[in-house]
Image: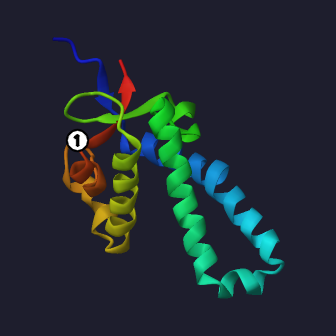
Amino acid sequence: MKQKAKIATRFDRFKAFVIDIFLIYVPILYISYFLLGSKEAFLQNQGVIFICSISFGILQAVFFALKAQSPGLKAYDLYIIDSKSGTKLNFLRLIYRYILFILSLGIVIGLFSTFFRKDGLMIHDLLSSSCIVHKI
């Protein structure tokens, strides 16, 4: 059986993530900043900052659930798939993956875990059985 996709490089995944930050997360931050009216009000309201982070995760999960791509992944022709079956992930599993992403980066191990594996997968990819791939 021919392989239809290969795991994307760390650098391609990073570039796609940066695009997602600028196209999805930054507008969320600007909207909440302007709704609160000032920088001080935004920085003192931890609930709004938390809601911004959750909103980013939900929007990214919606993109992934619909097309298996976010704007950043689309820019580099990458897709997120189930690493075992090769199919799209469902919305709840994508939310689970985002929660694992936040937790693994919070304990810093998730940030460096990719450098200890030949395939470059991170902890949240392994635990959610997902991977970001290039079509061949």
Question: Where is the N terminus found, in terms of image quarters?
Answer: top left
Q: What is the x, y in percent for residue 97?
A: 35, 53
Rendered position, 120 above or below 74: below
For residue 76, side relative to residue 5 (left or right) = right
Q: Residue at x 66, y 88 (%)?
A: 44
Q: What is the x, y in percent for residue 94?
A: 38, 47
Q: Residue furthest left?
A: 1
Rendered position, 133 above or below 10: above
Q: Residue at x 60, y 66 (%)?
A: 52
Q: Residue at x 23, y 44 (%)?
A: 129
Q: Nearer the viewer, residue 57 or 105?
A: 57
Rendered position, 41 above or below 13: below
For residue 105, side relative to residue 118 (left or right) = right
- Dividing the picture into quadrants, the one containing residue 99 is bottom left
What kind of element bears circle 1?
loop
Q: How many marks?
A: 1
Q: Nearer the viewer, residue 68 or 110?
A: 68
Q: Residue at x 76, y 63 (%)?
A: 31
For residue 13, side relative to residue 111 (left or right) = right
Question: On the image, numbered disc 1 is attached to which residue?
Answer: 119
Mark 1 surroundings: few (<14), some (14-19) or many (≥20) residues within 10 A: some
Question: Where is the C terminus found, in terms of image quarters?
Answer: top left
Q: What is the x, y in percent for residue 34?
A: 81, 70
Q: What is the x, y in percent for residue 17?
A: 51, 49
Q: Amino acid at mark 1?
A: Asp
Rendered position, 123 above or below 135: below
